[in-house]
Image (spheres, grey):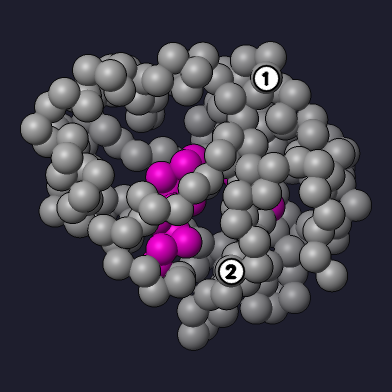
Amino acid sequence: MPTLLLIRHGENDFLKQGRLPGHLPDIHLNARGREQAAALAETLQAQPIRAIYSSPLERAVETAEPLAQALGQPIQLRPGLLDTDVGEWQGLHLRKLRKLLMWKQVQEQPSTFRFPGGESFLEIQERLVSEIESIRRAHKHRDMLAVFFHADPIKLVLAHFLGLPLDNFQKLRVAAGSVSILMVGKSGGQLAALNLEPPFVMYK
């Protein structure tokens, strides 16, 4: 089964300020995020990575760029890896959203929640799993692939392939600039590592 390095993009000012970015364009890595991207490249460049995939959003692409340059590989953009469409909540501060009655539903029963004017968590998970399966099918069973995208999407992918109920996906932690290692086959997935932050030693 292919080994997928599920990599969350680095820090940006929206993340630092506690704002929901959704699909907003022109959100770029800040200085700390660029450091994280460079550290990821330094840690992963010795690995036998066969392909690099990314969400089209700038913060993910910019995180992938140092590794792509180190390996001399193109970044393959996949719209199916986009961050959550949070609709009317796009750009809002979390401190404001936490005061809403709906926020408890987001945290405790996400399987029943749809972002106002945006996606439901079920739709997000279905989109992401379809994209990951498409990537898996395009590669041989021993290939290692780097996939750069976003926090909740990574957690939703992990929850699906590990057989966790969607309502429990928020219990997983995926930090900015971290790597989670998932081996995916026809019968499901195996988690080799969660939330590794560079520098770290890859498993053998």
Is residue 145 among the parts visible in the rendering?
yes
Foreground pick, 188 / 169:
169
Where is residue 47 shown, x and y percent of the image? 85, 56
Is residue 81 among the parts visible in the rendering?
no
Q: Could you classify mark 1 by the number of other residues whose Cα lies within 10 Å: few (under 14), some (14-19), or many (20 or more)? A: some
Cα–Cα span, label 1 and label 2: 28 Å
- Residue shown at the point (28%, 19%) measured from the top left: 95
User: Viewed as shown, does residue 149 lie left or right of 192?
Assistant: left
Say which residue label 2 marks.
Answer: 191
- Residue shown at the point (36%, 50%) measured from the top left: 170
| Position of 116 relative to 135 (above/below) | above
Q: Quick one: SS at disc 1?
A: helix
Q: Tell me the amino acid under the disc marked 1.
A: Arg
The tag on residue 8 is none
**Quadrant hosting residue 203:** bottom right
| Position of 202 relative to 97 (above/below) | below
- Residue shown at the point (51%, 83%) measured from the top left: 186
Residue 151 lies within the magenta run: yes
The quadrant the N terminus occupies is bottom right
Q: What is the span of residues highlighted in magenta in the rendered image? A: 146-160
Where is residue 83 shown, x and y percent of the image? 41, 38
Where is residue 152 shown, x and y percent of the image? 41, 45
| Position of 159 relative to 12 (above/below) | below
- Residue shown at the point (49%, 68%) measured from the top left: 133
The quadrant the C terminus occupies is bottom right
Q: Tell me the amino acid under the disc marked 2.
A: Leu
Say which residue label 1 marks.
Answer: 32
